[in-house]
């Protein structure tokens, strides 16, 4: 590696880490203020651990911004100190000057992609440090799960996705015509590999074409057949239970409904990591549901954050490297205009994505490609 390339890399990395540290420190101070983290972590080691763990969460979003500003400041000061002119007059082409910075940008793209799975990285860090105090909350509270294909509706007061334990569970099962088959109201429920187990509750069975659901001696649901004449008579009685029993335990081995995707819908898309977003999109019973639109959009934004590091570097080069000599103030002002244009375009495209006018990939990719095309055009013009 040439001395000039080492110098350029050193200058770029210096600005990169400074930009990342400043931006992240502001976010971290806001975090401490919002969550009163200092009250819960009084030790210096705890605060430093929290600082590192939260940094992992923000890498995906701060790396592209840091790449942009580090490139902007590096080449702005090179131009101000006449170093860039000296390099060009010495026979260095712009491609040779840009090459080490572009290589580092590609490395940042890889790191950004790898850091999308923050849950695994945080788990590794906590395992290395023997601490679980920053473990993410794994419980979902007060949500409904409607499964139209299975004719079932669930209500949960809370559900722990790690243990599979639910509190205050209500299960309503219907036939194909929307009539009640049975209802279960229990203090708790446990999702296992062999279905659901309910504890301490009340069971209601309704008359249907299959008969009346009851609880047998094995604590499972069985169907008690009834004569056709009585069944027709009972169906005219309205929604009245024909069987009622309190229970200590009921086993439903044929039901394997997973509440986690519905619980994730209770959380804002911006508060979910990349893995949780993909789990929700892949496991949700109705993949075409409009409820998934903002979550698909957020997942696509995660994806574009990786190549955004390279796009940001190219954009900054187009602003900082120009034929005419410009002051640093002019360069910063011009970069602010580019940033405003980019985010206005992004807000507009995101709105189109949420409305379903554009797919999540197109709506999130348009701002990046528009800026990339314009940046390449500016670099070609100023070559």
Image (spheres, rainbow, N blue to C red):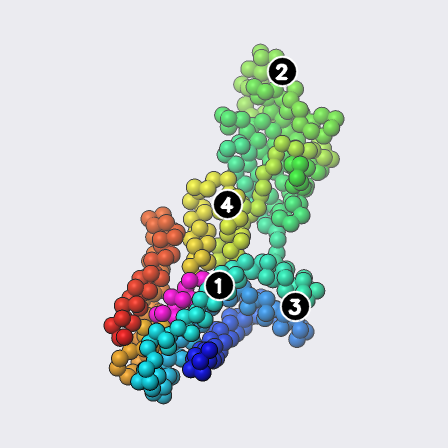
Q: Which residue is mark 3?
A: 40
Give the structural element (helix, strand or loop) at label 3: helix
Q: Which residue is mark 4?
A: 282
Alpha-carbon span between mark 4 and mark 2: 42 Å
Q: Is residue 37 left or right of residue 110?
A: right
The quarter of the displayed image where residue 104 is located: bottom left
Alpha-carbon span between mark 1 and mark 2: 66 Å
Q: Establish if 168 lies above or below 353.
A: above
Alpha-carbon span between mark 1 and mark 4: 24 Å
In the rendered structure, which disc, 1 or 2, sits on the residue that comes first in sequence? Answer: 1
Q: Are marks 1 and 2 in contact (CB under 8 Å)?
A: no
Give the structural element (helix, strand or loop) at label 2: loop
- Asked if the magenta segment contains residue 247, the reply would be no
Instruction: Looking at this view, name the residue that lies furthest to the bottom.
Output: 81
The residue lying toward the viewer, choosing from 66 and 13, is: 13
In the rendered structure, which disc, 1 or 4, sits on the residue that comes first in sequence? Answer: 1
In the rendered structure, which disc, 3 or 4, sits on the residue that comes first in sequence? Answer: 3
Q: Which residue is mark 2?
A: 226
The residue drawn where x is 58% and y is 38% is 257
The residue drawn where x is 54% and y is 42% is 144
Can residue 225 be seen? yes
Q: Position of residue 102 (x, y in %)?
A: 41, 70
Alpha-carbon span between mark 3 and mark 4: 36 Å
Q: Which residue is mark 1?
A: 110
Give the structural element (helix, strand or loop) at label 1: helix
Alpha-carbon span between mark 1 and mark 3: 34 Å
The span shown in magenta is 306-315
Can residue 15 be seen? no
Q: Position of residue 279 (x, y in %)?
A: 53, 48
């Amino acid at each position: 590696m040439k001395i000039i390339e080492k110098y350029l890399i050193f200058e770029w990395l210096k600005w990169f880490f400074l930009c990342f540290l400043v931006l992240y420190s502001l976010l971290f101070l806001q975090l401490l203020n919002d969550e009163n983290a200092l009250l819960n972590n009084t030790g210096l080691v705890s605060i430093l651990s929290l600082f590192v763990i939260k940094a992992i969460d923000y890498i995906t979003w701060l790396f592209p911004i840091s790449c942009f500003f580090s490139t902007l400041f590096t080449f702005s000061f090179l131009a101000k100190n006449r170093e860039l002119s000296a390099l060009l007059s010495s026979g260095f082409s712009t491609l040779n000057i840009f090459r080490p910075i572009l290589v580092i940008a590609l490395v940042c793209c890889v790191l950004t992609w790898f850091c999308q799975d923050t849950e695994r990285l945080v788990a590794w860090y906590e395992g290395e440090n023997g601490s679980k105090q920053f473990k993410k909350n794994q419980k979902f509270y007060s949500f409904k799960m409607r499964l139209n294909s299975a004719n079932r509706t669930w209500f949960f007061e809370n559900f722990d996705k790690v243990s599979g334990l639910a509190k205050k569970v209500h299960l309503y099962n219907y036939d194909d015509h929307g009539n009640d088959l049975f209802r279960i109201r229990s203090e708790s429920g446990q999702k296992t590999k062999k279905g659901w187990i309910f504890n301490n509750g009340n069971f209601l069975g309704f008359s249907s074409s299959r008969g009346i659901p009851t609880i047998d001696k094995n604590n499972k649901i069985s169907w008690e057949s009834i004569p056709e004449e009585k069944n027709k008579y009972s169906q005219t009685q309205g929604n009245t239970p024909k069987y009622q029993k309190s229970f200590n335990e009921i086993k439903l081995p044929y039901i394997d409904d997973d509440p986690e995707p519905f619980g994730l819908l209770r959380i804002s898309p911006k508060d979910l990591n990349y893995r949780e977003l993909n789990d929700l999109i892949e496991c949700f019973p109705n993949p075409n549901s409009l409820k998934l639109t903002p979550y698909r959009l957020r997942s696509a934004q995660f994806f574009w954050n990786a190549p955004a590091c390279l796009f940001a570097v190219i954009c900054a080069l187009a602003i900082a490297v120009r034929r005419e000599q410009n002051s640093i103030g002019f360069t910063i002002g011009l970069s602010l205009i580019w940033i405003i244009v980019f985010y206005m375009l992004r807000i507009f495209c995101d709105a189109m994505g949420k409305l379903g006018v554009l797919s999540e990939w197109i709506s999130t990719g348009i701002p990046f490609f528009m800026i990339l095309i314009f940046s390449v055009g500016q670099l070609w013009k100023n070559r």
